[in-house]
Image (spheres, rainbow, N blue to C red):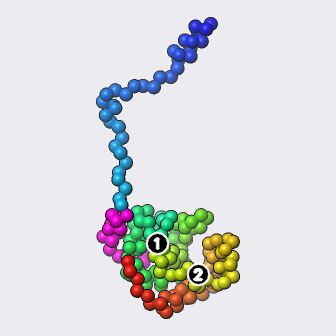
Amino acid sequence: MALLCSMISTGCARREPVASEGEARRTAPPPPRMPSASELRANALALGAGDCGDLKRIRHLVPKAGQLGQDPYYDRIYVHPVEYRSCLIERIPDATSIPAVHGGPGLQITNVGDMAYHMLDDMHLVPPNDCTPTDVRKDMETQGAFAFHHWRDDPANRRAWANCIQRHFAAQRQDIAP
C-alpha cells in the first residue's frame, strides 16, 4: 500500500516541461526605455500649438500638474501656455459635454469649461480660490473639491464664477514664461 501511494504521489505529479536550447534563446525582449521628461517636453513642443479644440481631445489627466507623457493633447497645451492662454480663458463658461476624464478621486471632468480651467490651474495661471465664495471655501476645508464642484455645477454659479475668472485675467494681464 505504501508503495502504491508513493507511486501515485511521485509518478502522477505534474512535471514542468524543460525548455530546449532554442526556446531558451527566445525570451521576451526587455521593456522599452521610458522617455525622459526633457524628451517628453521636446516631443510636445515639436507638435506646435493647436487650437482650443485640443481640450475636447484630452483623455487622460496627470496625477501631478506638469507630468508629461500621459496624453499628447494635455502635453501640447501644457507646454504652449502663451499660445493657449486666451482661448482657455474664453472657454471657461463653456458647458459643452466631453467624454468623462478622471480628475481625481471621485471627480470627473465632463465639459469644456472645466477642462479649460483645469489646464489653466495646472499651468499655475489662475489662483484657484479667488472667485470662489467664502462659504464654499469653508465647505472645501471639510469636503474638499466636492464642495467646489457641487457649487460650480449650478449654471448661475458657473456663469458668475466664469465671469469673475475672466475679469481676474483682464485685470492681471500677466506675462507668463513657458
* Residue type at the position of mark 1: Lys
**Residue 90 at what x, y percent from top left?**
47, 84
**Magenta: main secondary structure:** helix
SS under mark 2? loop
Magenta segment? 37-57
**Residue 34 at what x, y percent from top left?**
37, 56
Q: State the CA–CA distance, disc 1 to disc 2.
A: 25 Å
Q: Is residue 147 left or right of residue 11?
A: right
Residue appearing at x 35%, y 76% in the figure:
49
* Residue tagged 1: 56
**Residue 105 at what x, y percent from top left?**
59, 64
SS under mark 1? helix
* Residue tagged 2: 129
The answer to which of marks 1 and 2 sits earlier in the sequence is: 1
Based on the picture, tell me whether residue 47 belongs to the magenta stretch.
yes
Residue appearing at x 30%, y 30% in the figure:
22
**Residue 36 at what x, y percent from top left?**
36, 61
Res. 81 image quadrant: bottom left
Based on the picture, tell me whether residue 158 belongs to the magenta stretch.
no
Residue appearing at x 40%, y 83% in the figure:
176
Q: Is residue 47 left or right of residue 65?
A: left
Count how many numbered circles sit on residues in the image: 2
* Residue type at the position of mark 2: Asn
